[in-house]
Image (cartoon, rainbow, N blue to C red):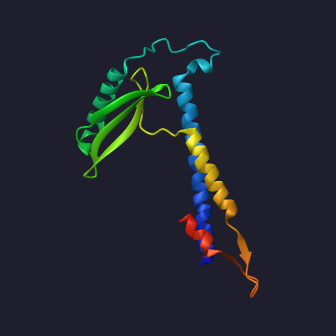
Amino acid sequence: MELKKKDKKAENNIWLIVSVVLAVALVGALGVILRPDLLSGGKSTDSDFVAISKEDAANKLVDFITEVYGSQIGTPVLKEVTEKYGMYEARISMVADGQPREEITFVTKDGKLFVPNVLIMEEALQQFRDWQNQQQQLQIMPDENDGQIYFDESMLEDQE
């Protein structure tokens, strides 16, 4: 039974690593999409980029969400839009699974890209480092009576 807990931790480790790699890939892809001039030595390759006002971008976002997801969430309501991380951050209220909730999404300044999930790298990196420190604190302790290796259960309780 003790080995199953160890296998579950190993499985969680794999998913955490996969999640971090995918998040980095997403951020890299967004960087290339939003700043194609980085790949072309500073020369802009997107001649049709025209920034629009945050209100216009937010209205396009609400129209998009209404048309695509409206049957699932009802009518989304824009609560606030601000500029953040070089994009527009929109706070939208909706009803999901019968419960009212508020979501924070992003839209690019030209109003063409909807970014429903954003990973803030500094926060994710801190969470990853905290998780690594917790893993290092887990100690495998040999039992003096039979030579078998057991986890210290008190350390595992903190991880669940």
Left-right relation of 47 to 82:
right
Up-down relation of residue 139 to residue 52 (above or below):
below
Up-down relation of residue 149 to residue 118 (above or below):
below
Give me the residue at 51% from left, 15% from top.
Answer: 46
Of residues 19 and 122, the one nearer the viewer is 122
Up-down relation of residue 133 to residue 64 (above or below):
below
Left-right relation of 40 to 101:
right
Give me the residue at 58% from left, 32% from top.
Answer: 28
Count of number-bearing discs = 0
Left-right relation of 68 to 117:
left
Q: Where is residue 139 in the image (x, y as percent from the top left)?
A: 70, 69
Q: In which quarter of the image is residue 89?
A: top left
Q: Where is residue 149 in the image (x, y as percent from the top left)?
A: 71, 77
Up-down relation of residue 95 to residue 6 (above or below):
above
Of residues 61 and 18, the one nearer the viewer is 61
Q: Quadrant of residue 57?
A: top left
Q: Where is residue 97 in the image (x, y as percent from the top left)?
A: 28, 52
Give me the residue at 23% from left, 38% from top.
Answer: 75
Name the image quarter holding the N terminus.
Answer: bottom right
Q: Which residue lies furthest to the bottom in this view?
A: 145
Left-right relation of 145 to 38:
right
